[in-house]
Amino acid sequence: METEYQPHFSRHEYFWKIHSAFLAADFWLISKGSREQLGRPIQEYKKRELATWRFPSRAKFAREGCFGMLTPKCLDPKYSYYLCEFIWQSGLWQTYSCGAITWQHLRINDVRNVFKPGSYFLTTEGNAILIAPVKLQAATAFMD
């Protein structure tokens, strides 16, 4: 009897999966670097090799500079990438940046909170953009 291969990370119906150094992601957000680059989505996973020659003991941490984003089943990965690009261009991630003046980082819990189900983003025009959908249950009404 053949068993079907199940990938370690499967898409959830409504939840984003966000992990550091996540090679199976649809795209990645830059999590370490300059304040202006934090949260910028990229199509290819890039290890951060910066400062490994200066601080060999911190080489592991310098390489893990991206958060992998696996989109929910109900969202198209291309749409999600451009949604993240819009969020980055709006400057949202700069408010979450931590660290020294020249070397900033994002916390993975902050990123997960932004992408939790039901979260939305308000544009400068006052429009609400849904970041993470919620499961809606249809209510039925019976008329007598």
Image (spheres, helix red, strand yellow):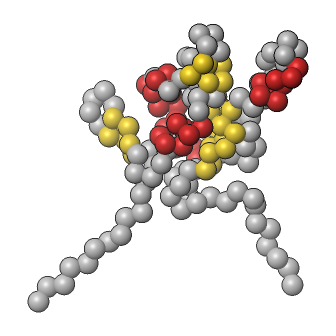
Residue 64 placement: quadrant:
top right
Residue 86 visible in the picture: no
Q: Position of residue 29 (x, y in %)?
A: 62, 33
The residue shown at (63%, 10%) is 102
Residue 121 placement: quadrant:
top left
Q: Position of residue 134 (x, y in %)?
A: 41, 57
The residue shown at (72%, 34%) is 44
The residue shown at (37%, 64%) is 136
Residue at the front extreme of this rendering: 57
The one nearer the camera, 107 or 10, is 107
Q: Position of residue 119 (x, y in %)?
A: 40, 46
Q: Is residue 71 above or below residue 57?
A: below
Q: Is residue 19 above or below residue 46?
A: below
Q: What is the quadrant of the C terminus in the image? A: bottom left
Residue at the left extreme of this rendering: 144
Is 36 situated left or right of 138 in this image? Answer: right
The residue shown at (36%, 69%) is 137
